[in-house]
């Protein structure tokens, strides 16, 4: 038995979107970001689909990387949060993971570690904090860290990549991105050796040529969502990689003045035909989606009315040709024909959150 709401993954869209990243940065190598179960799309599945067209993958943490290795994904895998213990280093050695070093505590962990194979050398990303103030060495610490790591007996000096992360590349009118890139480049230039760099996320790849470098790290664009609130995915030639569908389980005829849903927050302004859809916040549909949020029925646009419940939403189908709508028909909550970015805006959130939630809660249809 399965819940009614289900997601469908579109492999060709994933491949198309990865090609779009490569077109935008033709001289760069790609680390496809598939953290958080590939933003809900299924990490192993996404890695298989993207495998031939990417030089590597990135995930957040060691467990995510191990899952991919156990599924025989043999491309380089970067762990963006790096390691927190010598146990993590032991696992990273065993599974040949590329680690991120972003804090001096990790330098002492490396000093304490003795590898199972005395010949083992780690490939590392060394991360500089250029302004996001989340992970990364401050610029002056960064230079010291690189100098220490390039001579470290456990480090492969040819496997070093210098990285930073952009905090505001989705805001094209801000100076922040330019400042972050300049600060990072300046500190990389101050080193005694040239190393490959990795800067751009999706918003950087699509909007900031200056953020192209030896490596790019596309995430959200792979899944067919625009990283910019003002730009539609179609303008960027991105295609939805996930569709969320759920069936109509009841159709109701309500009178003008009757109220709908918890709290009776929606009052029918006219005689209204409603459809109850078996999908709610327990399936990853955002509870804060406002009345008026579009839902597709047979490619026609209906509107959410009233509050989102745990397992259901109520939509107004009065203006849809009634004969064509029946119990059992599938609604599209977002996907190929309805941009997730629209739904995210209606719920005052971002597509990332919706994809992770629905992707990790819903059943998957075969593709
Ligand atoms: C998540 C993440 C990315 C990808 O970001 P998108 O906005 O999804 O393209 C790139 N780099 C780092 C360090 C990340 O954490």
Image: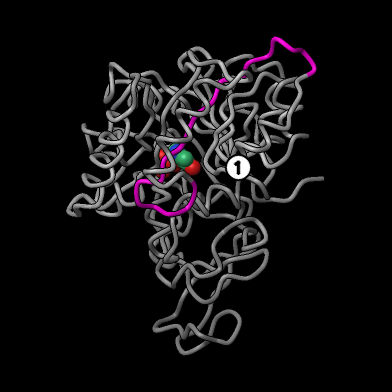
Question: Is residue 124 shown in magenta?
Answer: yes
Span of residues in magenta: 116-135
**Circle 1 residue:** 36
Magenta region, main secondary structure: loop
Q: In the rendered view, tell whether residue 102 sits above or below residue 323.
A: above
Q: Residue furthest right?
A: 1
Question: Is residue 15 shown in magenta?
Answer: no
User: Is residue 220 shown to the viewer in this render?
Assistant: no
User: How far across and down, in percent of the image, does residue 356 sit?
Assistant: 58, 48
Quarter of the N terminus within the rendering = top right
Q: In the rendered view, tell whether residue 301 sits above or below residue 46.
A: below
User: How far across and down, in percent of the image, does residue 134 sit?
Assistant: 47, 53
Quarter of the C terminus within the rendering = top right
Residue at position x 73%, y 32% in the image = 112
Residue at position x 59%, y 33% in the image = 79
Q: Secondary structure at mark 1?
A: helix
Residue at position x 77%, y 46% in the image = 2
Residue at position x 58%, y 20% in the image = 155
């Amino acid at each position: 038995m399965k819940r009614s709401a289900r997601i469908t993954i579109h492999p060709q869209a994933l491949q198309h979107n990865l090609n779009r990243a490569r077109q935008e940065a033709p001289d760069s190598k790609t680390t496809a970001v598939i953290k958080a179960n590939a933003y809900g799309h299924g990490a192993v599945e996404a890695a298989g689909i993207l495998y031939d067209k990417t030089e590597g993958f990135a995930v957040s943490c060691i467990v995510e990387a191990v899952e991919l290795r156990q599924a025989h994904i043999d491309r380089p895998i970067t762990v963006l949060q790096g390691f927190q213990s010598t146990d993590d280093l032991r696992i990273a050695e065993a599974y040949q993971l590329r680690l991120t070093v972003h804090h001096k505590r990790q330098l002492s962990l490396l000093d304490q570690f003795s590898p199972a194979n005395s010949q083992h050398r780690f490939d590392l990303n060394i991360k500089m904090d250029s302004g996001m103030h989340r992970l990364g060495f401050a610029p002056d610490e960064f230079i010291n860290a690189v100098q220490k790591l390039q001579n470290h007996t456990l480090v492969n000096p040819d496997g070093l990549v210098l990285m930073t992360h952009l905090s505001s590349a989705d805001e094209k009118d801000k100076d922040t991105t330019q400042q972050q890139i300049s600060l990072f480049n300046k500190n990389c230039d101050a080193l005694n050796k040239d190393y490959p760099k990795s800067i751009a996320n999706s918003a950087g790849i699509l909007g900031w040529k200056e953020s192209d470098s030896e490596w790019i790290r596309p995430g959200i664009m792979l899944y067919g969502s625009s990283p910019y609130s003002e730009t539609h995915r179609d303008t960027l030639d991105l295609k939805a990689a996930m569709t969320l569908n759920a069936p109509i389980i009841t159709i109701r005829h309500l009178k003008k003045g009757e109220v709908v849903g918890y709290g009776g927050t929606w009052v029918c302004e006219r005689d209204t035909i409603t459809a109850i859809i078996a999908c709610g916040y327990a399936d990853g549909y955002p509870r804060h989606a406002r009345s008026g949020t579009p839902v597709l029925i047979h490619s026609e646009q209906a509107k959410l009315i009233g509050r989102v419940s745990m397992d259901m939403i109520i939509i107004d189908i009065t203006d849809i040709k009634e004969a064509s709508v029946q119990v059992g028909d599938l609604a599209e909550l977002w996907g190929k024909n309805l941009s997730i970015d629209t739904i995210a805006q209606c719920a005052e959130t971002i597509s990332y959150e919706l994809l992770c939630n629905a992707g990790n809660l819903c059943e998957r249809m075969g593709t």
